[in-house]
Image (cartoon, helix red, strand yellow):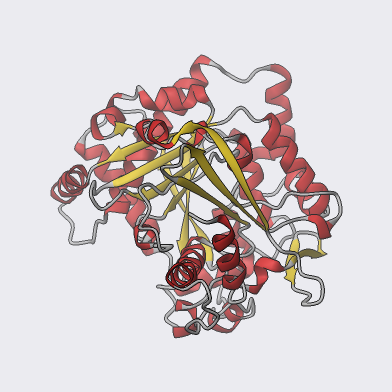
Amino acid sequence: MSTELLKRSFYKAIEDFPLFAGRLRQVLPGKLEVVVDSNNLNLPKFTEVQSSMDFANFEAANFNPALLPDSAVKPTAFFTGGFQEEKIKLADICIVKFKNGGGVVLSVAAAHVLVDGYGFNMFMHRWAEINKELVADCTATDFEACNTVYSRSLPQTVVPTPQGPVLEVLQKMYIPGGYLSRLVAWLSPGIRGKIVEYIHASAVISISCFYVSRKTLVQLRQSVKEISATDKRISDNDVLMAAIIIAYAQSILKHESEHPDTGLVSWLKSAMLGSSSKNHMTFATMEAVDIRHRILNSNLENYSGNSVISMMVHSPIELLQMPVSSEILAQVALGVRKSTNGVTSEYIAQVFYGADAESDGVFRPLVYNTFVAERLTVTNFSRFTLYTTDFGWGVPQFVAPANAKFPKIATFFPAHPSKDGIFVHLVDSASILQQIQTNSFWAEISDFIY
């Protein structure tokens, strides 16, 4: 696999995704925009590193990203760099080559201000398409046109004006603002990036991967349908989210009981988060929801920007603490379905405009997910065509998130077509992940990968 060819095709691909070469600018506290100067491009970093291990050993370890060189494992959503804004790179690409050849790892990080999961998938397919043509003919210069829409003004033209007060739904979606989120919003992108880099360097966070088979998902979904006796659609996402909510909440609560916050730590949490850290009645799960399929507009189908909003699922902790049964799973899954059905055009409008109504709205999830135990963020990539991305050397054997450095995140990725099912990637402290791995319910429905 030629690094030079990958680099050439990459820079050709970003002609259709020009914001990848842009610079981050903060126009107001908490309000960011990407500016592209054609005379002074901020091209993404593109590097190659050498691993000291054989690819066969990496494959035998189930492609565990913890075994990759540190320089290849990048955070995947946040802007880091120097104190000066012009030094902040919004995308980072690293090619990992292994001893004696045999395979490579393509590590790609892009800030959420550029793309969401849908847009990232579009970009990877475009890059692969161009590279595949260059593999066939390295002299190729003309490539089929791409219909990508990247203008950040597009969502404003398709999202309706909200009919109700925007702050009301904002308070339900995010924890109310506190001193910390307002401080983060006030900081410049450069200083904020340095803080994120420091957190990355000091965080003791791990990532675990679990496999849930298609057969298990079908069985879980069928049991929920039978117990609930409802005509409502119950999806794989409903039951998988319900399962991880139960397992994660039980693990968190067990860890809290064994390691309670006391003294100064407890006081600092209350001071920074206000009353939010005192509400232990429900477990809050935030799921990323793509508006493309909820607001019908042909331009949105080709929109590469971030069109994701958040949906909240509140599950009673008293319910989650009960021994797991089909009835408990059904109640939680129906709660997920109810919240999903609540993502109407009015909800989208209120969230879309509400997130900008207060300066710290965008940063609340980042800040408070870290400190509040009873929260989890879920992103579902399982519907993306990740295993059809062919750079000219065949489709990937394994696709997964890198070693993220922020805790309380669950990501669903499709398994390889030969395996079927879904991989669930969880990011948290090693002690929390160990609790989840030993949770009897979760161990019954999943296989530990790494």
Count all numbered tags in the image, as a single digit.
0
Residue 416 % position (x, y): 30, 50
Eyeballing the image, is 257 above or below 300?
Answer: above
On the rendered structure, is 371 left or right of 87? left
Image quarter hosting the C terminus: top left
Q: Which quadrant would residue 298 be assigned to in this image?
A: bottom left
Q: Which residue is most to the right?
A: 84
The residue positioned 32% from the left and 40% from the top of the image is 243
On the rendered structure, is 230 left or right of 16? left
Q: Which quadrant would residue 9 be assigned to in this image?
A: bottom right
Foreground pick, 3 / 395: 3
Residue 99 % position (x, y): 49, 35
The residue positioned 48% from the left and 70% from the top of the image is 134
Q: Which residue is most to the top?
A: 258
Residue 200 shows up from this direction: yes
Residue 359 % position (x, y): 75, 59
Foreground pick, 122 / 324: 122
Foreground pick, 352 / 6: 6
Residue 281 shows up from this direction: no
Eyeballing the image, is 410 above or below 136?
Answer: above
Foreground pick, 54 / 290: 54
The residue positioned 41% from the left and 49% from the top of the image is 399
On the rendered structure, is 38 left or right of 117? right
